[in-house]
Image (cartoon, rainbow, N blue to C red):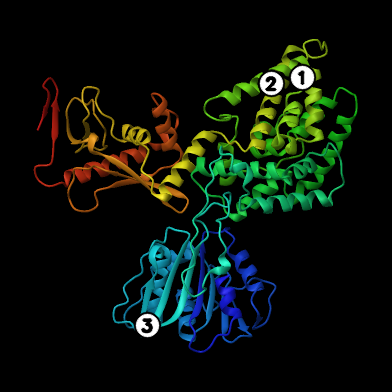
Amino acid sequence: MALVKVCNAFCGPNDPRCLVMLVGGAGNGKSKLAADTVAQIDGTLQGERSKFAKRKYCFQLKTGGDLKVINDATIPAEDRCTAPLLRDLAEAISRQDHLLACVNRGVLISEASTEVTDKDMDELLLAKCLANWLLTGEPTELSGNEFQLELAGDARKGSGNYGFAKVRKAGSHIASIHAVYMDQASLLEAWPEGDERMNEPLEPLEVRGSRLIPLLSSERATTSCAFEECLRKVAHAFAADAEVRALDPVLSNAFSLQAEFPARGWCSMMRGAEVISGSQFTYRELWALATHSLVGPSTPGVLDGMSAEIDTWIGAADSDGDGSLEALVALGNMRTHMLLFDAGNPGVASSPTRFRHSWPSTSNEALRSVSLADPLRQFGPSDGKKYLELADRLSRIEDKELPITSLALEEVAVGQYFTELDGRIEAKIAEAVNPENDRSSLKVRNSLLDWYGRYMYRLVAFARGWPAHCSVVHAWQDAWIDARVGRPFRRELEDAILDIVAPVERTNSEAYFTFLKPRVAGNSTDQSVAEIEIPRNRMRVSAEAFGDRIEIMIDPGDIRDGKNRQASTPLDFHLLREAQSRVRGQGFTDSLELIEPRIERLRASLVAKGLAAQEGQHRFRFSKVGMGSVTR
């Protein structure tokens, strides 16, 4: 909006220009945002149009001046320039052009390493300075240059969502630079509140931080996230163009996802996958997952075959023959809550009740992340009450009760997701697993109950927006909020993290770490070892939020070297999960194996800082076979 305001206003020869840099990895929506922005600007495209995307476009503005748009900085320049982005930045400054640039981090890494000497023109030196600032948050020196780069407050940190700088020439303000980091906030959280129209376009914008709403809070159910509208629109468009068929699973998926609460539940499931995997879905990946949620891992080459097979299953399901149950189960396997976790899995695809047309072999980081959020791994809040309630409902299906149907009448979210297909499946399963049904053997009944249990738990968790380990995901979001506003680290969590990093011996409160060894270990049981004490009772843990991550700092407390006292590591899902388990008990979850290499590096950092402490602050312990230990 800042660029639109400036470009659509009068631009005199001495007015400052506006440079907007959209920075992020591939697939984060930079080009889409650039296209939407250009569409609002009153200008005329210069040069010939091409059916292929160009690296750069130029628009002549009706208000005066030019706007250069770098559509994709990864496209090589026509003259094969080795640092085209630096050249583009230098030209924008020298020619007084407005600039909108879509820049991948890989391009910044490459061009920030380009050698630029004092013999080059001042504009190119300034461009190199800008590239370093965009990449690291710290600009290079501009001593002796006619340009000065003036950073604004928090814009010095390139790890945030937004940065701002002014370019001055001989003291005069000639350009304002807005840096927007497209991959530092989740699209599965709520939009920041505020009215950006009130911002002055040539001054730092009002930076409104990301709004993280914990999964299990009541506010989450009533607040839409950034991607939710996109999901609902594509589902609505799909449903509007299709022929209405009650048992069509793809159409059922579209009807479910166009509703408010199921779409919100989808976003919460994907958000849980982000936190658990420690990754962040790009705009492109979310669109792919949305499509996958409708039709599974289908490519255009198999869609016709899939459609024909669905018709076959629907025909069989509508009959009263022996194949109707198998057909309904096959159609149920194509519901969104099953597709997200099963589709593309070769073991599941070989099931006789699975869509028999050849599923494409599907394997990518996004789907692997989603599989970690499968509610079958751990259902509902950690107290287990909701799991037991649903287990009790499930047990009643053998008494001809319909647990999902009754739950759909009680809960709005489940009711909006529930379709006629789900009801037909449940009624048929209830009939088949009834002990009085002589046509179903015990083996068949157990197999159907196993499948239906997975179907039911996933459906309910999906509608409620409960990914696996939702309590830990909720706690991580709470921790991010605390770190963002500067609240002190909670004492019980601090003690649990220190218990992981610096375990103490049972007889005292001291933590000893080995050194002069290949690995740093705490309280070693080796027969011959030298250890250094890191006083556990003086350690303090603090946290800061950077973009969509949490960094924790451990201060040893007694190492007075004046600087670099803290050892740091990300507080991710696995570290928090292990720490929480120690708050409530003895710990030792399967997350411990994943965090151990990082914990060892953290201990090594603490040992290095301890060894570098001033003379007289060290406390060592030496042990030898048959001699016990000596502390000095």
Query: 57 above or below 30?
Result: below
Seen in the image, is 463 located left or right of residue 149?
right
User: Which disc is residue 180 wearing?
Assistant: none
- The residue positioned 65% from the left and 24% from the top of the image is 390
Q: Secondary structure at mark 1?
A: loop
User: Which disc is residue 122 wearing?
Assistant: 3
Name the residue type under label 3: Asp
Q: Callout 1 environment at 10 Å: few (<14), some (14 to 19), or many (20+)?
A: some
Q: Is residue 145 visible?
A: yes
Name the residue type under label 1: Glu
- The residue positioned 46% from the left and 54% from the top of the image is 547
Which of the marked residues, 2 or 3, is nearer the chain's N terminus?
A: 3
**Which of the 4 quarters of the picture holds residue 58?**
bottom right
Q: Secondary structure at mark 2?
A: helix
Q: Mark 2, mark 3: which one is toward the viewer?
A: 2
Compare residues 278 and 510 and report the one nearer the observer.
Answer: 510
Whole-percent x and y of residue 298? 72, 46
Mark 2, residue position? 393
Query: 233 above or below 257?
Result: below
Seen in the image, is 560 located left or right of residue 540?
left
User: Which disc is residue 401 wearing?
Assistant: 1
Q: Are marks 2 and 3 in contact (CB under 8 Å)?
A: no
Q: Callout 3 environment at 10 Å: few (<14), some (14 to 19), or many (20+)?
A: some
Whole-percent x and y of residue 620? 13, 34
Q: Are marks 1 and 2 in contact (CB under 8 Å)?
A: yes
Compare residues 346 and 26 and report the one nearer the observer.
Answer: 26
Q: What is the distance, in whole Å, between disc 3 and disc 1 at their CAs?
A: 78 Å
Q: Secondary structure at mark 3?
A: helix
